[in-house]
Image: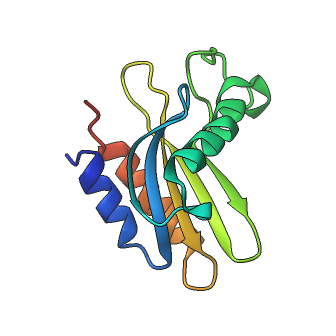
Amino acid sequence: MPGIDECLLEAMRLPGARGAAVVDWTSGLALGTVGDSPGGDHERTAAEAAELARLAAEHRAFAPEGDADWSENACPVEDLIIANRDSYHLLRFVPTTFDSSVFLHLWLAREEGNLALARIRLGEMAGRLVLG
């Protein structure tokens, strides 16, 4: 099972990958980064992405319909996709048996990247990621 560094290197092998990070959405800290970062600052990007992740994860409006098991400590969201003119940002939450607040952030060039493939692969990576 891959750790953070292996997971990030695997993410960078995706077509169009510009940068990737593993981020704790509670603190906004990057636990690991690779490649480029929008604006050139991985820590700032991690903090800003964490704000979006926190909003999605903590609000019942984004929980699956009829999810009786939802609580403020469980993330009901699988991923977030933010699209702009030249790139995608894919935030994939990492499921764990403990109260995890970690997500993978992939910055993907729109022209070279394949959003569907990236979403599938990040889901696989998140499922295999070993934290700790």
Can residue 63 be seen here? The reply is no
Q: Quadrant of residue 116?
A: bottom right
Going 59% across and 46% down the picture, which residue do you hit? 44
Residue found farthest to the bottom: 111
Going 34% across and 57% down the picture, which residue do you hit? 8
For the image shown, how many numbered marks are present on the structure? 0
Viewer-side residue, 6 vs 27:
27
Going 55% across and 76% down the picture, which residue do you hit? 114
Q: Quadrant of residue 68?
A: top right
Viewer-side residue, 15 vs 128:
15
Going 55% across and 70% down the picture, which residue do you hit? 108
Could you say where residue 126 lies in the image, as x and y percent from the top left? 39, 46
Could you say where residue 65 lies in the image, as x and y percent from the top left? 74, 30
Could you say where residue 31 lies in the image, as x and y percent from the top left? 38, 40
88 to 29, vertically: above or below: below
In the picture, the quarter occupied by the C terminus is top left
Could you say where residue 10 lies in the image, as x and y percent from the top left? 31, 64
- Residue 84 lies left or right of residue 37; in this view the side is right
Residue found farthest to the right: 61
Residue found farthest to the left: 1
Viewer-side residue, 59 vs 107:
107
- Residue 109 lies left or right of residue 14; in this view the side is right
Q: Give the image's coloring scheme.
A: rainbow
Can residue 131 be seen here? The reply is yes
119 to 22, vertically: above or below: below
34 to 61, vertically: above or below: below
Viewer-side residue, 120 vs 29:
29
- Residue 7 lies left or right of residue 17; in this view the side is left
